[in-house]
Image (cartoon, grey):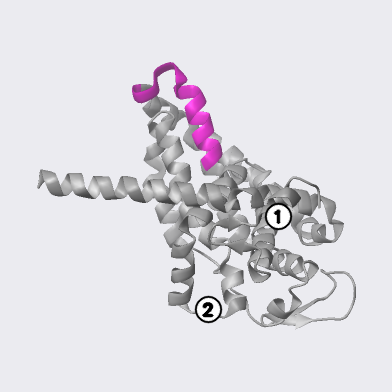
């Protein structure tokens, strides 16, 4: 039995090492940053966010205040047993993380679902992958990428994702472990967030479940690295709504590069790594 456990442990360590190397080579973790730069430098992409800004900011503020009022003291008291004097800071960070996650789930479910779809499609159009977008919505004539977006033919995002929320709550206790637990928590969330960022892309490609799973598994390291970077950005309360849009832009830029063959198994092409250092 002990030998079997050791064998499984070694296999798991080897798998993690392999995915870590793949993640580093892929350069996918750069795309959330590229998404910020691209979003800031392309004003037409601001339209979906600006149309939802006031209600989403109000929701974020309300959620954050509610969570601090009702959950901060109990969690700080519990963390005193594991983190001592650091409990106050750790509990505050944990409540901010919880607030951000709850805010993101509620806003994506109630307020910004269509806006994120428009943003993703708009980026693809701006990167000259209009043929891909046309499989999921009508395309109008014009020069403004956002203005060219017509009526949706397919809408991929689920209104509510209970599995994601249950998974989040299930792994939440990891945050009670100083430093290492938080790192593990972010990595686990990143493994889910990475593939989820391409839900729209998979639908536009008209891939079935097995095709999606095969693609994700072949690029597991890349998707995890993208997801970790995106999760870290979206942990910021209130501002997480902005990063939800910039992460969507980054995911669309990545999808566009995949369509153009600029992303290989070995990672992002060298010329794109150079471009990622420049403002687009």
Rate crowding at label 1 as few (under 14), some (14 to 19) or many (20 or more) other CA atoms within 10 Å: some
The residue positioned 73% from the left and 73% from the top of the image is 129
Q: Which residue is mark 1?
A: 272
Residue 74 vs residue 8, the one in the foreground: 8
Residue 82 image offset from top left, x and y in percent = 35, 24
Q: Position of residue 178 (x, y in %)?
A: 41, 28
Q: Quadrant of residue 50?
A: bottom right
Question: Which quadrant would residue 136 be assigned to in this image?
Answer: bottom right
* Residue linked to disc 2: 207
Q: Is residue 225 magenta?
A: no
Q: Is residue 273 visible?
A: yes
Q: Secondary structure at mark 2?
A: loop
Drawn side of residue 101 relative to residue 138, left or right: left
Q: Position of residue 278 (x, y in %)?
A: 79, 46
User: What's the magenta bit mostly, secondary-structure-wise?
Assistant: helix
Q: CA distance from mark 1 to mark 2?
A: 26 Å
Q: Which quarter of the picture shows residue 162?
A: bottom left
Would you say residue 86 sits in the magenta stretch? Answer: yes
Relative depth, front residue between 66 and 197: 197
The answer to whether residue 97 is above or below residue 126 is above
Extent of the magenta region: 81-97
> Which of the two discs, 1 and 2, labels the residue nearer the N terminus?
2
In the image, residue 180 above or below residue 53: above
Residue 242 in sight: no
Q: Is residue 184 left or right of residue 272?
A: left
Residue 250 location (% of width, % of height): 67, 56
């Amino acid at each position: 039995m002990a030998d079997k456990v050791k064998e499984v442990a070694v296999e798991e360590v080897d798998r993690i090492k392999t995915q870590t190397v793949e993640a580093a080579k892929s350069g996918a973790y750069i795309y959330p940053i590229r998404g910020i730069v691209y979003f800031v430098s392309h004003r037409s992409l601001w339209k979906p966010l600006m149309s939802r800004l006031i209600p989403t900011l109000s929701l974020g503020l309300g959620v954050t205040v509610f969570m601090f009022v009702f959950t901060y003291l109990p969690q700080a008291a519990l963390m005193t047993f594991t983190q001592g004097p650091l409990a106050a800071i750790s509990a505050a960070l944990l409540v901010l993380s919880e607030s951000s996650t709850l805010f993101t789930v509620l806003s994506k479910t109630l307020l910004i679902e269509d806006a994120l779809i428009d943003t993703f499609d708009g980026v693809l159009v701006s990167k000259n992958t209009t043929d891909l977008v046309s499989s999921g919505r009508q395309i109008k004539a014009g020069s403004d990428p956002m203005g060219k977006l017509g009526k949706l033919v397919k809408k991929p995002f689920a209104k509510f994702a209970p599995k994601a929320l249950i998974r989040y709550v299930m792994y939440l206790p990891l945050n009670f472990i100083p430093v290492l637990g938080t790192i593990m928590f972010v990595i686990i969330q990143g493994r889910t967030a990475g593939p989820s960022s391409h839900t729209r892309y998979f639908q536009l490609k008209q891939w079935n479940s097995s095709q999606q799973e095969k693609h994700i598994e072949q690029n597991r390291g890349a998707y995890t690295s993208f997801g970790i970077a995106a999760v870290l950005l979206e942990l910021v309360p209130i501002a997480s709504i902005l990063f939800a849009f910039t992460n969507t832009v980054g995911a669309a830029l990545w999808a566009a590069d995949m369509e153009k063959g600029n992303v290989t198994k070995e990672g992002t092409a060298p010329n794109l790594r150079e471009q990622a250092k420049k403002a687009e």
